[in-house]
Image (spheres, rainbow, N blue to C red):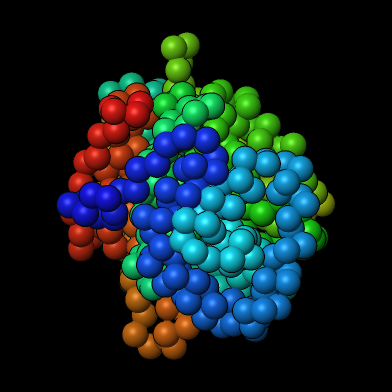
Amino acid sequence: MINQVPFPIISVEGDAYERGYQYGSQCDKLIEEALGIYRRIFKAESNLDWEPALELARKFTSFIEEYDPSSMEEMRGIAEGAKQSFDNILALNVRTELMLLGGTGGVEECTTLAATPEATLSGHMLMAQNWDMKPAAAKVTVMLKEKQKNGPNIIQIVEAGIVGKMGFNSAGVCVLANIMVSDGWHLGVPMQIILRKIMSQESLVDAMGAVLMAKRGSSGNYLIGYTGGEGSEAVDIETAPDYYNIIWPNSGIIAHANHFSVTNSNIKDLLPPLDPGSLNRERRATKLLTKECGHIDMDVMKKVLRDHFDKKGPGSICCHIDPHLDEALQWLTNASFVIDLNKKTMDVAKGPPCENEYVTLNFEDIM
């Protein structure tokens, strides 16, 4: 474990179970803390006590097993390594679905950006995100560095015990994510498992397929970037459980928040009344990137992620704690990062990027 970085770097290798066991054993204390945090989140957001949460999480097992057996093996390894029950680790990986049970939970989570070579100064593929979440989640966040026995190597930012979130791989695939809320939620493949499967893909089309072919149980937004020998591309996939929208870059730019940007008569977007700030964040990010089109570099991306339009509140891209709100309702930019997919580097800041410096991390040893 390396600590001279914004978040601890956890290095694992081998097959799915071996990686999971190493992950769990290195993060046992953090996983225990993460379980406590999510106990409180599930209760506050969904009025769900822990035992009912475990019972509900178990109902997702068959969908995960069918869709991505390696994720099941990795979770079993995490449980063994961390000396936790499998059900506890499963609940962490069904966190999105349990947190938003009934579509009424707090959802001020994330602004994502992509700039393809036609929009960037260097001609590189740039991806960026502010991860907004309950402040306590930052305490259990790690950077998971995975050398896979079968498949590309991976670096991703996750809460301890979770198998899939935001990151990129040695094949040039990157995925960023936004929670979304629509009607039609049902049992299916959880969002974190879909993210993990995207991370094991080696092409843009296969990464898209990991989203589109999943029997999804919830809504989510997947901003996927790819760079390879024949060029670079980005695509955004807005998903409800049974429907989806595809968004390609406009002049090389995509910005997304937590609402559906494309009107689809089959999807009822429940988010705007819960988080109207999402509408502003996406509009603001698009406006700022468009202004710099053709000249976008890492600094421009960071400037967008530091933006405080809407007084640092939930409508602001850079989100700060509102002292007037109850602790259970607090949200914060816990991590901010910019990825250069051509260089395979990630600039990462812990906490709001207006207050914390970005640290450049190079992963040449696995990329």
Quadrant position of residue 227: top left
Image location of residue 215, percent across then percent down: 77, 46
Residue 223 in the figure: left or right of residue 351: right
- Left or right: 143 with respect to 216? left
On the image, the x and y values in percent for residue 334 come to 35, 63
Tell which residue pokes out farthest to the top in this image: 230
The answer to whether residue 120 is left or right of residue 260 is: left
Q: Quadrant of the C terminus?
A: top left
Q: Residue at x 39, y 59 (%)?
A: 27
In front: 276, or 74? 74
Above/below status of 232 relative to 347: above
Residue 13 makes an appearance in the image = yes
Residue 258: image quadrant is bottom right
Residue 291: x, y in percent?
35, 40
Of 158 and 85, nearer the camera is 85
- Name the residue nearer the viewer: 112 or 346: 346
**Residue for point 42% across, 72% down:** 33
The structure residue drawn at horizontal position 45% and vertical position 17%, both measured from the top left corner, is 228
